[in-house]
Amino acid sequence: MTQPLQVPSGTRCRLSDFDPDEHEGLDRQTAEAETRRHCEALDELAYRLFAESRRSVVLVLQGIDTSGKDGTIRMVASGVSPQCLDVASFKAPSALELAHDFLWRVHARIPAHGRIGIFNRSHYEDVIVVRVRKLVPEQVWRARYAPINAFEKLLSDAGVTFVKCFLHISREEQRKRLADRLQDPTKQWKLGPADLDDRLLWDDFQAAYEDAISACNMPEAPWHIVPANRKWYRNLVVARLLRQALERLDPRFPPFDPTLIKRLD
Ligand code: AMP
Ligand code: MG
């Protein structure tokens, strides 16, 4: 059964309602071919967004460690010209960032008109990891849902379209991926003790995600739960969502001044 990917605004998100193995019965080859077609369309749409230069798009990627944020970025970047793309990765905040409000560093990375920004993690870390690892008191992270909604509304009114994706993998799939990373010399560098500590907090992370997705899910900036146990299906879903968002924007080339033709010698 194909499940709805979008969490209806105003309803409670329960991640257990979404099957991380969902793949619409597709096989890998068919899905990859469809993803390539979406990427070709994306390249063209991104070029038009860039030419129009009035609006921008932010693809927010959230998900537990190993959920596939990096791989998803590689897929989008394989389709869209780097000229139109900005990638921002949000790590533990620096001293300078901590000396500002939590949205300061995020606002600074919102893509300029005409560009697509990909957020590898985002302002949602400030209500997820900080909550689970108890980096701030509850009243501090709880008070952040309202400013997140206000921030996304401000930006959406200013011509920023949000495509927010939660990459949903199962606990068992994460175990497999962590085991792979522990064995693979080209991936070992990605692992630190924090990743294994975070796995022990799996249920707390799921609960924090459910609360954040439920609280910050306005129609202007809805969440999508992306079944991500199969990397090729995850890529297909994200490519499709991004393409749909750009098609809805339908960016136009700016009007041409025909007097320019006469000016060529
Ligand atoms: P990675 O994405 O694997 O490079 O790891 C980045 C790390 O930075 C993750 O463990 C995140 O949870 C952490 N991180 C990102 N944003 C924040 C934040 N606002 N506060 C604390 N830790 C954060
Ligand atoms: Mg990591």
Image: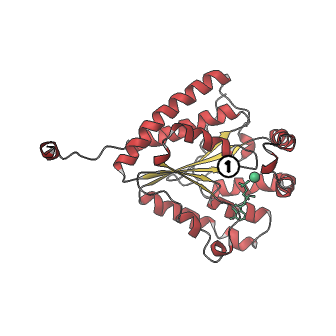
Residue count near mark 1 (Cα–Cα under 10 Å), binned few <14, some 14–19, many ≥20: many
Decide if residue 26 is in sight here: no
From this viewpoint, which residue is outermost toward the front? 265
Residue at point 83%, 42% (across, down): 185
- Taking depth in this image into account, of 126 and 116 the one nearest to the observer is 116
Ligand 1's image quarter is: bottom right
Residue at point 69%, 73% (across, down): 140
| Side of 150 where 205 appears, left or right | right
Position of the C terminus, as image quadrant, is: top left
Q: How many marks?
A: 1
x and y, in percent, of residue 113 in the image? 41, 55
Residue at disc 1, secondary structure: loop
Q: Is mark 1 within 8 Å of ligand 1?
A: no
Q: Which residue is mark 1?
A: 13
| Side of 180 where 18 appears, left or right | left
What colour scheme governs how the chains and residues are painted in the rendered image of this protein? secondary structure
x and y, in percent, of residue 119 in the image? 59, 53
Decide if residue 204 is in sight here: yes
Position of the N terminus, as image quadrant, is: top right
Residue at point 53%, 65% (across, down): 107
Place residue 261 in its image quadrant. Answer: top left
x and y, in percent, of residue 76 in the image? 56, 40
From this viewpoint, which residue is outermost toward the bottom? 99
Instruction: Residue type at mark 1: give it.
Output: Cys
Q: Is residue 237 above or below residue 189?
A: above
x and y, in percent, of residue 54 in the image? 36, 54
- Taking depth in this image into account, of 96 and 55 the one nearest to the observer is 96
Place residue 147 in its image quadrant. Answer: bottom right
